[in-house]
Amino acid sequence: DAKTTQPPSMDCAEGRAANLPCNHSTISGNEYVYWYRQIHSQGPQYIIHGLKNNETNEMASLIITEDRKSSTLILPHATLRDTAVYYCIVRVPSDYGGSQGNLIFGKGTKLSVKP
Amino acid sequence: NAGVMQNPRHLVRRRGQEARLRCSPMKGHSHVYWYRQLPEEGLKFMVYLQKENIIDESGMPKERFSAEFPKEGPSILRIQQVVRGDSAAYFCASSQKTGDHYGYTFGSGTRLTVV
């Protein structure tokens, strides 16, 4: 699985959009970009994933550049409860031949949402 | 619609004792994964199991650690003769039989403290 690079920490004002970047310059054609977050003392939570098109769900939006070498997770209206460590992971889903279960979590970005 | 259930939430063991951690996957999920998170570090994959089978144990320490997922009942991660270095949060995740394209669901973890 490709490696990712994320800033170690970011601050965001409550109610504003939080934009979390991720670089994955060595991503291969069949690797998807996944985002998880871990709120303090809890298990990781799946947020969103995508291949090359922008994706949106009830939690967030994922913007992937045309060359797929970087992406941005957008929390449109951050709340205090969004304070967490956010992990960007690139991998091939097992449905398409990837190894199952072995998610490689880096250090992530610690997002602090401030009132 | 219960998620992944782990128990106990907190476990204290003296050095040399055995620790047993339990995980019940989400309803409809037949694949279970165990991860370990040492203090101030990221999550590390340990083992991937299906019912009655260990599929990938590449992340498991060679000694003292074992895992099972019997035909009936929860998955068990067993640590024999615990040492202080085993103190960590242990997370279980599950996914659908059809594949992990839509990510993993994690439990709230068991925090093991070895005194």
Image: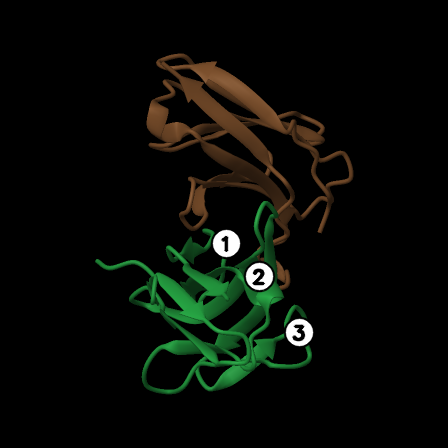
Chain colours: A brown, B green
Marks 1 and 3, the one that precedes in the sequence: 3
Task: Indicate the secondary structure of the residue bearing disc 1.
Answer: loop
Q: Vertically, is B113 above or below B54?
A: above
Labels 2, 3: front one:
3
Labels 1, 3: one chain: yes
Hey, what amino acid is under mark 3?
A: Pro
The residue wearing badge 2 is A94
**Residue drawn at 29 percent across, 66 percent down:** B27
**Residue drawn at 49 percent across, 80 percent down:** B17
Quarter of the C terminus of chain A within the rendering: top left
Q: Is residue B104 left or right of residue A67?
A: left
The residue wearing badge 3 is B61
Q: Nearer the viewer, residue A18 or A55?
A: A18
How far apart marks 2 and 3 lie (CA) works out to 24 Å
**Mark 2 near mark 1, Cβ–Cβ under 8 Å?**
yes
The residue wearing badge 1 is B101
**Residue drawn at 61 percent across, 57 percent down:** B44
Task: Indicate the secondary structure of the residue bearing disc 2.
Answer: helix
How far apart marks 2 and 1 lie (CA) works out to 7 Å
Q: Can residue B96 be seen here?
A: yes
Letter of the chain that mark 1 sits on in the rendering: B
Q: Nearer the viewer, residue B77 or B111?
A: B111
Q: Is residue B33 left or right of residue A102?
A: left
